[in-house]
Image (cartoon, grey):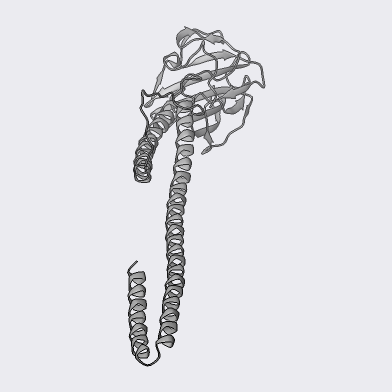
């Protein structure tokens, strides 16, 4: 509007000059002065009309440019929010996967935690239109909570993993499937027909060639022949426990090999001092032989890693 006012003032000044010239001309030629004055008025009106139209056009173009700039700024803001939303979606997927792993590691019941379903929520209202600033703050707050939850779940996963490693290294289960105990731990009559003896392990009924399985994770510390035991595998579980599997017909592991609970380490047999095919299992704790029934789930089948 300032430009229009300046333009109008200039046109008025121009008309004043033309009027003065017309006054001077009227003293000499009255008829010509009237014509000049009319022409000046027409010229002034036409100039004002043209100038006003140009200014209106310039004003519209300026408004359109401002609207385009505002629209572009809003679009950039939306694009930035979309990028942050994509990051949050990736974080949510990572947390869901981590939560699913923890559910399995913690052996939680099916359906206790379902990470594919939304969490039930509600509210009494009323609701209002959310502003861009409020939405941006909400996204930032959610991102912070995701990071904190991710850190906490990662620590929990590490603890559960360490606990699982400790559990898997403790003897548990039985060394042969679908079997039963034929001789227990402790004093007994010598099965070879000569007096009594202290039986250092437990014997399980087997058929020659049946798979013999490790009862805990560990490293093979011996694989070979021992007097009276025949073909033997010994596994060091790294926590003070060692397990021994004797009278095998064939050994399937070597010293230094890593084995897992439920992994097949030998084939059952009747080598050494034996009356028939069976699996002899011993458990040693810090260098002392102990009763395997303290550790083994004899009625729960075999645990597989």
Quadrant (top left/top right/bottom left/bottom right) for the N terminus: bottom left
Question: Can residue 236 be seen in this snapshot?
Answer: no
In this rendered view, identify the residue nearer to me: 27 or 219: 27
Percent from the top left, x then y, of residue 169?
Answer: 44, 28
In this rendered view, identify the residue nearer to me: 278 or 160: 160
The quarter holding residue 10 reads: bottom left
Depicted 76 relative to depicted 214: above or below: below
In this rendered view, identify the residue nearer to me: 98 or 12: 12
Which residue shows up at 59% across the image and 12% down it? Answer: 179
Percent from the top left, x then y, of residue 263?
Answer: 57, 28
Depicted 103 relative to depicted 95: above or below: above
The quarter holding residue 153 reads: top left
Depicted 197 relative to depicted 148: above or below: above
Percent from the top left, x then y, of residue 69?
Answer: 43, 60
In this rendered view, identify the residue nearer to me: 32 or 298: 32
Which residue shows up at 59% across the image and 23% down it? Answer: 212
Count of numbered circles in the view: 0
Q: Residue furthest bottom?
A: 28
Question: Can residue 159 be seen in this snapshot?
Answer: yes
Percent from the top left, x then y, of residue 39?
Answer: 45, 80
Q: Specify whether 39 is left or right of 179.
A: left
Depicted 172 relative to depicted 89: above or below: above
């Amino acid at each position: 509007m300032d430009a229009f006012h300046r333009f109008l003032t200039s046109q008025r000044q121009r008309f004043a000059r033309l009027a003065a010239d017309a006054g001077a001309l009227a003293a000499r030629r009255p008829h010509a002065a009237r014509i000049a004055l009319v022409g000046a008025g027409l010229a002034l009106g036409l100039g004002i009309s043209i100038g006003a139209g140009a200014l209106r056009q310039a004003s519209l173009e300026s408004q359109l440019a401002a609207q385009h700039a505002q629209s572009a700024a809003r679009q950039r803001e939306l694009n930035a929010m979309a990028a942050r939303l994509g990051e949050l979606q990736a974080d949510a997927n990572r947390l869901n996967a981590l939560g699913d792993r923890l559910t399995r590691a913690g052996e939680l019941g099916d359906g206790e935690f379902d990470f594919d379903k939304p969490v039930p929520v509600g509210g009494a209202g009323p609701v209002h239109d959310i502003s861009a600033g409020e939405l941006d703050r909400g996204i930032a707050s959610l991102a912070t909570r995701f990071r904190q939850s991710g850190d906490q779940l990662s620590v929990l996963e590490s603890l559960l993993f360490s606990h699982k490693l400790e559990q898997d290294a403790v003897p548990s289960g039985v060394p042969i499937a679908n079997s039963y105990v034929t001789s227990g731990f402790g004093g007994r009559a010598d099965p070879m027909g000569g007096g009594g003896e202290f039986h250092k392990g437990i014997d399980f009924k087997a058929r020659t060639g049946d798979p013999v399985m490790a009862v805990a994770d560990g490293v093979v510390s011996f694989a070979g022949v021992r007097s009276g035991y025949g073909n033997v595998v010994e596994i060091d579980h790294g926590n003070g426990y060692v397990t021994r599997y004797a009278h095998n017909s064939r050994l399937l592991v070597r010293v230094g090999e890593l084995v897992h609970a439920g992994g097949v380490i030998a084939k059952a047999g009747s080598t050494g001092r034996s009356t028939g095919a069976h699996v002899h299992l011993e458990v040693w704790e810090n260098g002392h032989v102990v009763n395997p029934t303290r550790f083994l789930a004899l009625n729960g089948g075999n645990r597989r890693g």
